[in-house]
Image (cartoon, helix red, strand yellow):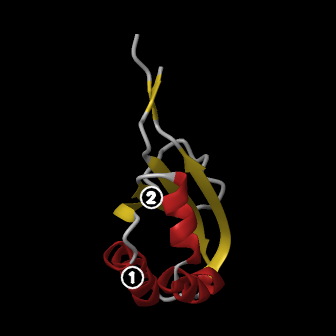
């Protein structure tokens, strides 16, 4: 198996609090997506909602994935004022959250 050189993925699973209007959720998602334009080490951003038929989501409804060139890039992102300010808006809207960073590994057989 081969670990991707440098690339690090930052994954956030979220469940928004009951009562948060869908237009507010949409605004928060657009704000999250805009971080890629404000924070240089953040190279890509993708998001989606659960579509699984396995019902193993444990209540999480949204996934957000950002791509960075290194662990140092994630550290810079975490401390960046745009991220800190956005977190002050985003996190209070969540009932629960999981964050997981990983270096992708390609399985070659």
Instruction: Estimate how packed mark 2 is, as few (under 14), some (14 to 19) or many (20 or more) residues with alpha carbons within 10 Å.
Output: some
Q: Nearer the viewer, residue 9 or 81?
A: 81
Residue 55 in the figure: left or right of residue 69? right
Secondary structure beneath disc 2? strand
- Residue found at x 57% / y 64%: 75
Which quadrant of the figure has residue 48? Answer: bottom left
Q: Nearer the viewer, residue 25 or 5?
A: 5
User: Circle 1 is placed at which residue position?
Assistant: 26
- Residue found at x 44% / y 58%: 65
User: Circle 2 is placed at which residue position?
Assistant: 65
Q: Residue 55 location in percent, x, y?
A: 58, 47
- Residue found at x 51% / y 41%: 103
Q: Is 21 rendered above or below residue 29?
A: below
Q: Is 2 rendered above or below residue 88?
A: above
Give the mark, 1 or 2, whose residue is nearer the N terminus.
Answer: 1
Extreme top residue here? 109
Q: Nearer the viewer, residue 34 or 51?
A: 34
Which quadrant of the figure has residue 6? Answer: top left
Q: Residue 17 location in percent, x, y?
A: 63, 80
Q: Nearer the viewer, residue 4 or 29?
A: 4
Q: Tell whether label 2 touches label 1 (CB within 8 Å).
A: no
- Residue found at x 47% / y 38%: 104
């Amino acid at each position: 198996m081969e670990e991707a050189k440098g690339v690090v993925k930052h994954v956030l699973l979220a469940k928004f609090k009951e009562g948060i209007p869908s237009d507010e959720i949409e605004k928060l998602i657009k704000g999250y997506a805009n971080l890629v334009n404000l924070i240089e080490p953040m190279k890509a951003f993708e998001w989606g909602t659960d579509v699984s038929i396995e019902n193993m989501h444990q209540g999480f409804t949204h996934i957000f994935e950002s791509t960075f060139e290194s662990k140092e890039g994630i550290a810079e992102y975490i401390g960046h004022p745009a991220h800190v300010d956005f977190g002050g808006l985003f996190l209070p809207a969540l009932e629960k959250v999981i964050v997981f960073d990983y270096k992708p590994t390609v399985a070659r057989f």
